[in-house]
Image: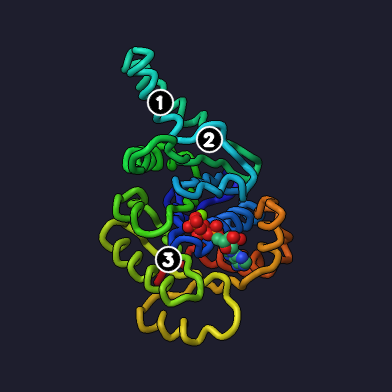
Amino acid sequence: MNEKNHYEKPLTISVVGKGGSGKTIITTLLAKSISKKHNFKMLLIDADPTHPHLSHMVNLVPEKSLEKLRTDVIDEILTKAKDFEKVAENIDFEVYNAIAESKAFSLFSIGQPEGPGCFCPSNTLLRKVIGSISKDFDIVLIDCEAGLEQINRMVIESVDILLIVSDISIRSIETAAAIRESAKKFTKYKKLGLILNRVKGNTDYIEKKLKKLNLPLLMEIPEDDAITEFELEGKPIIDIPESSKSYLKIKKLAERILNPKFFEN
Ligand SMILES: Nc1ncnc2c1ncn2[C@@H]1O[C@H](COP(=O)(O)OP(=O)(O)OP(=O)(O)O)[C@@H](O)[C@H]1O
Ligand SMILES: [Mg+2]
């Protein structure tokens, strides 16, 4: 690390919100903005087992997901009858191998379960892995699954900053308020704020609603044709021009949340 991190290492930022609100886009643009301005050692976690798009948006795809690692370990013990202790000794090494690295940041992905069943085992493992590998980084940025599940299961219990993304619908704002209530119970967040995404037209009604709910608005990100264009062509969002209107706002957001004063009130 060439740059002093003002925070207790690591600073953990989780991006949550209703399905389709723009969590992965915001995570990607934040990663771009933080890596352009700072020399922090940053880990991105694609924690969404349902829509694992982060690695493609940032153009860094790990060879193995956490879910694949988990099923391989089970397979080694059950079908290849490998010594349990030897497999256990190797797990840390395997986890580090599942982290993809670029100049700008590292990334690992929870991955999608192949068979039937719920996401509980992978979420439990994810919680443990976040705890064990985060200490090697200055910043950990997590793109979460939509809704409340990963908060309620305490997967992101040790988060510092909780960024709740919402579109301009009242339903999405209500989901944001429900997320805050869960986060109060099941996480130890230090700061929480709302990012209003895909903003266009008059949003007075939303601002009134936010005031009523006492939800702090951190930034408004406009509806951006550059994002739509990149998505239509399947290009990685991380390559979006720095002059794009959404990126300019995300830069401001990054400056705001990385300023130590952000934690003062
Ligand atoms: N500011 C924006 N301007 C234009 N399009 C946007 C903007 N933000 C998000 N989108 C579009 O909205 C869609 C959903 O975005 P994204 O995948 O980031 O949402 P998500 O919350 O991660 O969804 P999921 O819950 O499925 O993981 C994408 O097609 C994306 O291109
Ligand atoms: Mg997503």
Residue kind at label 3, given as amino acid type: Phe
Query: Residue under circle 1?
Result: 91
Q: Secondary structure at mark 3?
A: helix
Q: Earlier in the sequence, mark 2 or mark 1?
A: 1
Residue 96 position, x and y percent, is 49, 31
Rendered image coloring scheme: rainbow
Above or below 244: residue 187: above
Residue name at image x 47 percent, y 40 percent: 111
- Name the one closer to the observer, 59 or 19: 19
Query: Residue under circle 2?
Result: 99
Above or below 24: residue 262: below
Q: Which mark is residue 263?
A: 3
User: Quarter holding the C terminus?
Assistant: bottom left
Q: Secondary structure at mark 1?
A: helix
Q: CA distance from mark 2 to mark 3?
A: 30 Å
Q: Are marks 2 and 3 in contact (CB under 8 Å)?
A: no
Residue kind at label 1, given as amino acid type: Ile
Number of callouts in the render? 3
Residue 119 position, x and y percent, is 36, 43
Structural crowding at the residue carrying mark 3, measured as other residues with C-alpha within 10 Å and reported as few (<14), some (14–19) or many (≥20): few
Q: Secondary structure at mark 2?
A: loop
Residue 15 position, x and y percent, is 46, 58
Q: In the figure, residue 252 lies in which quadrant? A: bottom right
Q: Earlier in the sequence, mark 2 or mark 3?
A: 2
Residue name at image x 69 percent, y 57 percent: 232
